């Protein structure tokens, strides 16, 4: 078997940032961010398989089962044939994955297992999304869905599986509560936090009432008018649901591997989408107006079919769990109402042939339930429909069996940037087997042809991926300078200072570029995001510095700045870590130092942050320097430079603010050798309650390597001491 390189998916941040990005870009926000704990989002994107992009190798995940639904695990490469747009393609790579159940507790020591064969490996972690629908559901159905989801987490999700939680409601839209994670506790808490009160449901009841009234004749006209209005609202809700899930499917293209969505819903009533016929042309008892025929809704049918294609193209399967409790729900009260209710019963109890009642009307017609729509959605995406939510334990066991074993087939593809859809078909030589795989994939296309959502996803990929899919962006440098914040807020004002390389203008040739800043806390929750536009043209051979300020509470943060050409999509990115210490109630506090070297050909651009009710505050008020003489050190300082300039903000909460002594030391992180440094004061200035010290430190003769700078401040009369560190690279 060929040796396929597999980079393990990274836990980089949140896919649901898409909702924020859409808002920032002025687009329709199709994904919603939960509001719990501030702007908490719990979604992560995955780093794609690099070889699938760089060398044009397409990977296809294939599930094969027998007629009883049991996985077939003994197939070889030669048993498969693959066609791409109808053309046979040679399978160059082949893997077999088998999910083995946890071993039973052994009484005696177990023997050492034999090494696995080269062609058979333990299963890679599967990807599951628990998808709870509130719009087409009932409170009891949602409650059962939560029970099934928790059972899946406790009993069915295997070690290494990644699980996420999604919900959809009429008011909140599509919400990703937790993205793919192996942390079961996080997903379980997210499921527990779901409230059954958000369910709208009973769309099938509206359908049943509509069709009953439609066959009662003109005496029901007044009643049917109100029902028709509610029915049109249900139709609008159905289209909103379909479009939202379609947008989600497009986003899933960026997640490698096969995605399994466990949809808990009663489904969209099939009569809303595909129409329905009731009665006969002559009507009931020969009354012609007691019949009804409604053609399929062309818009909903097209949207629904497009959803199937998008799910297939993103390698996603829907396993639908019908949250109704029986396959044939009883309709006893509706039967009585049709016979005796409102003085215009339409049931023909008495006829020329005697008493005639149709016993089939004791049950709801499946035409007005979501069974057909759910089963079609599952069957079209390679999933499966499960009825009767009360049987969820057995159904989840079947799901486990269906998804536990699979094959990965690889074949070469051309890198044609035309955005065309390619249909994939996979067949096996052995007869009587069921093959499930993705329906196809889309070629990449030029940035100018991207839709608004695609441009947003492109930005998301640049912002969150360790290895962006579309391009290898220019890599800049980013540093975080944590300075004093506004009194009483408990937050520091952190300056994010990015330096883009001198060839940035060569890459970003459009009239304008957008600059988007992301800040994530230690738990990967989005803390801050902001966007600005700048003209980058005309800065050839010049380094570009961009700074923006954010207010952050004490803690650790991951920060990234993305600069993207709005015409070509070319980009530059820069990332760093930030640390904001806990506030000091008294004494000294040193803030992050800014290290400066000799000035080069540089351009400065600034994103501003309004400081409370006052006017915006420039970051250079906290870190003053002359850009004609100095530039911030982006990464390394030449050992030929005689001195390093340092700007060091300090806050002294004691009474003796002017009696502070400073000293510095240098520690080699490679040899642990310590050097004493001589600091030469250059200037001292006050900015509010902050004292800003500027020093020169001799660096001439230092050996190339990595160092840590230590700065100490001591207020001897008050007996207080503070220190701060900064990394330094000498080249």
Image (cartoon, rainbow, N blue to C red):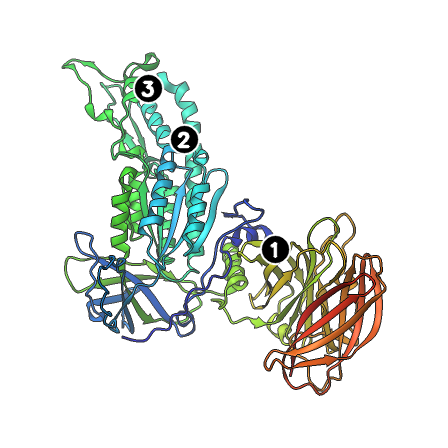
> What residue is shown with label 3?
217
- Quarter holding residue 205: top left
Few, some or many residues within 10 Å of mark 1 (<14, 14–19, 20+): some
Residue located 26% across and 27% down the image: 330
Comparing 378 with 404, the one in front is: 404
Comparing 291 with 338, the one in front is: 338
- Asked if residue 99 is positioned above or below residue 381 in the image, the reply reads below
Few, some or many residues within 10 Å of mark 3 (<14, 14–19, 20+): many
Residue 231, which numbered label?
2
Element type at marker 1?
A: strand
Comparing 461 with 142, the one in front is: 142
* Number of numbered discs visible in the structure rendering: 3
Whether residue 439 sits left or right of residue 478 in the image: it is: left
Q: Percent position (x, y) of residue 119?
A: 25, 71
Few, some or many residues within 10 Å of mark 2 (<14, 14–19, 20+): many
Residue 303 visible (yes or no): no
> What residue is shown with label 1?
529
Element type at marker 3?
A: loop
């Amino acid at each position: 078997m060929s040796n396929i390189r597999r980079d393990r998916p990274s836990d980089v941040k949140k896919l649901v940032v898409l909702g924020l990005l859409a808002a920032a870009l002025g687009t329709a926000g199709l994904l919603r961010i939960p509001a719990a704990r501030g702007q908490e989002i719990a979604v992560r994107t995955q780093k794609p398989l690099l070889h699938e992009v760089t060398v044009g190798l397409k990977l296809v995940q294939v599930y094969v089962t027998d007629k009883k639904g049991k996985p077939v695990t003994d197939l070889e490469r030669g048993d498969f044939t693959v066609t791409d747009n109808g053309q046979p393609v040679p399978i160059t790579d082949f893997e077999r994955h088998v999910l083995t159940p946890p071993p039973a507790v052994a009484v005696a020591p177990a023997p050492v297992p034999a090494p696995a064969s080269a062609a058979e490996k333990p299963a890679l972690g599967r990807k599951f999304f628990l998808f709870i629908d509130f719009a087409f559901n009932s409170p009891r159905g949602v409650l059962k869905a939560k029970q099934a989801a928790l059972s899946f987490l406790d009993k069915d999700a295997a070690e290494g599986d990644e699980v996420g939680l999604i919900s959809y409601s009429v008011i909140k839209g599509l919400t990703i509560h937790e993205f793919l994670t192996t942390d079961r506790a996080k997903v379980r808490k997210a499921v527990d936090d779901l409230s059954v009160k958000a369910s709208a449901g009973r769309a099938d009841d509206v359908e049943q009432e509509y069709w009953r009234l439609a066959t009662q004749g003109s005496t029901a006209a007044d009643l049917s008018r109100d029902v028709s209005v509610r029915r049109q609202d249900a139709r609008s809700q159905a289209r909103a649901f379909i479009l939202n899930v379609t947008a989600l499917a497009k986003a899933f293209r960026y997640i490698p591997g096969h995605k399994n969505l466990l949809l808990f819903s009663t489904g969209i009533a099939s009569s809303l989408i595909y129409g329905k016929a009731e009665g006969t042309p002559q009507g009931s008892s020969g009354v012609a107006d007691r019949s009804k025929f409604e053609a399929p809704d062309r818009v909903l049918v097209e949207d629904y079919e497009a959803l199937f294609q998008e799910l297939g193209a993103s390698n996603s399967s829907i396993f639908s769990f019908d949250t109704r409790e029986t396959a044939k729900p009883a309709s006893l009260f509706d039967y009585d109402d049709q016979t005796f209710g409102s003085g215009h019963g339409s049931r023909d109890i008495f006829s020329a042939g005697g008493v005639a009642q149709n016993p089939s009307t004791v049950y709801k017609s499946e035409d007005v339930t979501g069974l057909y729509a759910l089963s079609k959605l599952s069957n079209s995406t390679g999933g499966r429909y499960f009825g009767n939510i009360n049987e969820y334990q057995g159904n989840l066991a079947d799901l486990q069996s269906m998804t536990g074993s699979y094959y990965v087939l690889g074949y070469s593809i051309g890198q044609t940037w035309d955005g065309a859809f390619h249909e994939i078909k996979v067949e096996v030589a052995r007869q009587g087997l069921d093959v499930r795989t993705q329906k196809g994939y889309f070629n990449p296309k030029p940035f100018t042809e991207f839709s608004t959502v695609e441009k947003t996803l492109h930005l998301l990929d640049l912002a969150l991926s360790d290895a962006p899919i579309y391009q290898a962006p220019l890599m800049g440098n980013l540093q975080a300078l944590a300075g004093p914040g506004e009194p009483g807020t408990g937050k520091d004002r952190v300056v994010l200072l990015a330096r883009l390389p001198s060839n940035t203008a060569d890459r970003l040739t459009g009239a304008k570029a957008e600059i988007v800043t992301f800040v994530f806390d230690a738990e990967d929750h989005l803390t801050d995001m902001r966007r600005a536009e700048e003209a980058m043209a005309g800065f050839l051979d010049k380094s570009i510095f961009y700074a923006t300020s954010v207010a952050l509470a004490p803690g650790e943060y991951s920060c990234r700045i993305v600069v993207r050409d709005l015409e070509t999509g070319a980009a530059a990115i820069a990332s760093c870590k930030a640390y904001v210490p806990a506030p000091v109630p008294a004494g000294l506090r040193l803030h992050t130092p800014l290290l400066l070297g000799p000035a080069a050909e540089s351009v400065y651009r600034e994103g501003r942050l309004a400081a409370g009710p006052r006017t915006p505050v420039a970051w250079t008020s906290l870190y003053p320097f002359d850009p004609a003489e100095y530039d911030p050190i982006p990464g390394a300082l030449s050992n030929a430079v005689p001195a390093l300039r340092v700007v060091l903000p300090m806050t002294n909460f004691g009474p003796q603010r002017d009696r502070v002594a400073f000293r510095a030391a240098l520690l080699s992180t490679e040899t642990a050798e310590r050097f004493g440094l001589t600091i030469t004061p250059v200037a001292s200035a006050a900015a509010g309650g902050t004292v800003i010290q500027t020093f020169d430190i001799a660096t001439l003769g230092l050996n190339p390597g990595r160092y840590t700078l230590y700065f100490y401040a001591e207020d001897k009369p008050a007996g207080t001491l503070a220190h701060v560190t900064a990394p330094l690279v000498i080249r």
